[in-house]
Image (spheres, rainbow, N blue to C red):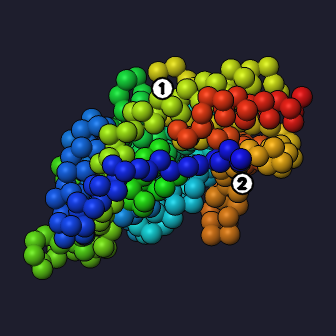
């Protein structure tokens, strides 16, 4: 049997909660969504949370709530899923790319700082916590305060990850999460914005609901980016399970790291003060494509996140970027199964298959 790269963990509890919502008749936005928002904000340690239809809409709405739009320039990493840049573009702002730290795969604050000191205009930064490892938000927060730009955390892959004991979702002016089926917790499709700023929360809540103030009164042009009560019902159960899921991911990651310690592959780095929640366990190997193919022959479903940096995508080839580390990573990274459905024996089997191929 193939050890899959992802396997959403859903069960009877989710079925029962969804059934309750269906029987209650409130299927769209409603009290179930408000309860999920409150519980997720509490989990992150944030003052407010606003639920959305998916992670991309969370990013878009957060930028709108921060008044980022036409005429603004927003920096992010080119080594991420395209939704990060798409949200910037959809807000009307201009995307710009800063290369990654090759050890963490996250935006390199040193490179950003050099460009800021050279006078480059930056109105906002979207910092991606790639693979479940927080970006250096301490440095980024300092730069945001010094150079007066908004900081948004793209925490789509980092539910529960911490920096110096504080969970992500609390370091930026806003943070955005995804609940896509492959994420560390899911609602089927869904997203969440967290913030400590009441104005940002109010602006986001208004934007995702057609710019509505009350009833049929609308103060601005908005979208229907609302989460359904069915999705929220699933999310509330998943949030209760998230600590257990995270512990299992970390245990599997520890097993993989130990088993691959003497192999030629490069295993993940976790800087001091940060905790990794291993949305993906990502190794590096020069002959990555051959390794992936050989693992498939051994029933290990490895995957590449992401094979094409954003500045090499046709949609963003007009954006000039000096990003050699992102380009090199895109050629070498390979993610191994690490999700909660992977047993300890599975993790050892995955590592054994890797060692067999690369020895």
Q: Left or right: where does residue 296 sit relative to residue 248? A: right
Residue 60 in view in this figure = no
For disc 2, the neighbor class at 10 Å (few under 14, some 14 to 19, many from 20) is: many
C-alpha span from label 2 to label 1: 26 Å
Q: Position of residue 123 (x, y in %)?
A: 41, 53
Residue 353 or 20: which is nearer the viewer?
20
Instruction: Name above or below for residue 310 compared with residue 104.
Output: below
Residue 236 in view in this figure = yes
Q: Which residue is mark 1?
A: 274
Task: Name the secondary structure under disc 1.
Answer: strand
- Mark 2 near mark 1, Cβ–Cβ under 8 Å? no
Identity of the residue drawn at 47% across and 29% down: 247
For disc 1, the neighbor class at 10 Å (few under 14, some 14 to 19, many from 20) is: some
Q: Position of residue 311 (x, y in %)?
A: 66, 59
Rendered image: mark on residue 307:
2
Marks counted in the figure total 2
Task: Name the secondary structure under disc 2.
Answer: loop
Residue 359 or 135: which is nearer the viewer?
359
Identity of the residue drawn at 52% across and 60% down: 83
Identity of the residue drawn at 71% across and 47% down: 1
Identity of the residue drawn at 64% across and 47% down: 5
Instruction: Name above or below for residue 323 compared with residue 242.
Output: below
Q: Position of residue 22 (x, y in %)?
A: 25, 67
Looking at the rendering, which quadrant does residue 50 occupy?
bottom left
Instruction: Name above or below for residue 247 compared with residue 293.
Output: above
Q: Left or right: where does residue 224 sit relative to residue 320? A: left
Looking at the rendering, which quadrant does residue 320 occupy?
bottom right
Q: Left or right: where does residue 213 sit relative to residue 207? A: left
* Mark positioned earlier in the residue sequence (2 or 1): 1
Residue 191 or 130: which is nearer the viewer?
191
């Amino acid at each position: 049997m193939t050890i899959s790269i992802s396997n959403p963990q859903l069960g009877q509890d989710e079925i029962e909660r969804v059934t309750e919502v269906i029987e209650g008749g409130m299927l769209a936005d409603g009290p179930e969504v408000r309860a999920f928002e409150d519980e997720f904000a509490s989990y992150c340690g944030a003052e407010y949370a606003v639920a959305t239809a998916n992670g991309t809409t969370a990013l878009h709405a957060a930028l709108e709530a921060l008044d980022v739009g036409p005429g603004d320039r927003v920096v992010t990493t080119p080594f991420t899923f395209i939704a990060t840049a798409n949200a910037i573009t959809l807000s009307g702002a201009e995307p710009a790319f800063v290369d990654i730290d090759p050890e963490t795969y996250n935006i390199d604050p040193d490179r950003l700082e050099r460009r800021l000191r050279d006078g480059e205009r930056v109105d906002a930064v979207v910092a991606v916590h790639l693979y479940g490892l927080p970006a250096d938000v301490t440095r980024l927060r300092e730069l945001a305060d010094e150079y007066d730009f908004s900081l948004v955390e793209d925490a789509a892959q980092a539910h529960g990850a911490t920096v110096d004991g504080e969970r992500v979702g609390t370091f930026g002016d806003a943070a955005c999460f995804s609940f896509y089926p492959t994420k560390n917790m899911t609602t089927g499709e869904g997203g969440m914005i967290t913030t400590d700023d009441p104005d940002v929360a109010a602006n986001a809540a208004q934007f995702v609901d057609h710019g509505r103030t009350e009833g049929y009164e609308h103060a601005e042009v908005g979208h229907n980016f609302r989460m359904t009560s069915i999705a929220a019902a699933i999310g509330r159960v998943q949030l209760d399970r998230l600590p257990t899921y995270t512990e299992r991911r970390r245990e599997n990651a520890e097993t993989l790291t130990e088993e691959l310690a003497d192999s030629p592959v490069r295993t993940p780095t976790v800087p001091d003060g940060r905790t990794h929640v291993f949305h993906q366990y990502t190794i590096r190997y020069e002959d990555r494509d051959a390794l992936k193919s050989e693992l498939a022959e051994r029933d290990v479903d490895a995957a590449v996140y992401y094979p094409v940096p954003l500045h090499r995508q046709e949609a963003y080839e007009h954006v000039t970027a000096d990003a050699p580390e992102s380009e090199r990573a895109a050629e070498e990274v390979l993610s191994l199964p690490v999700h909660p459905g992977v047993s300890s024996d599975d993790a050892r089997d995955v590592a054994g298959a890797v060692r067999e191929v690369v020895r």
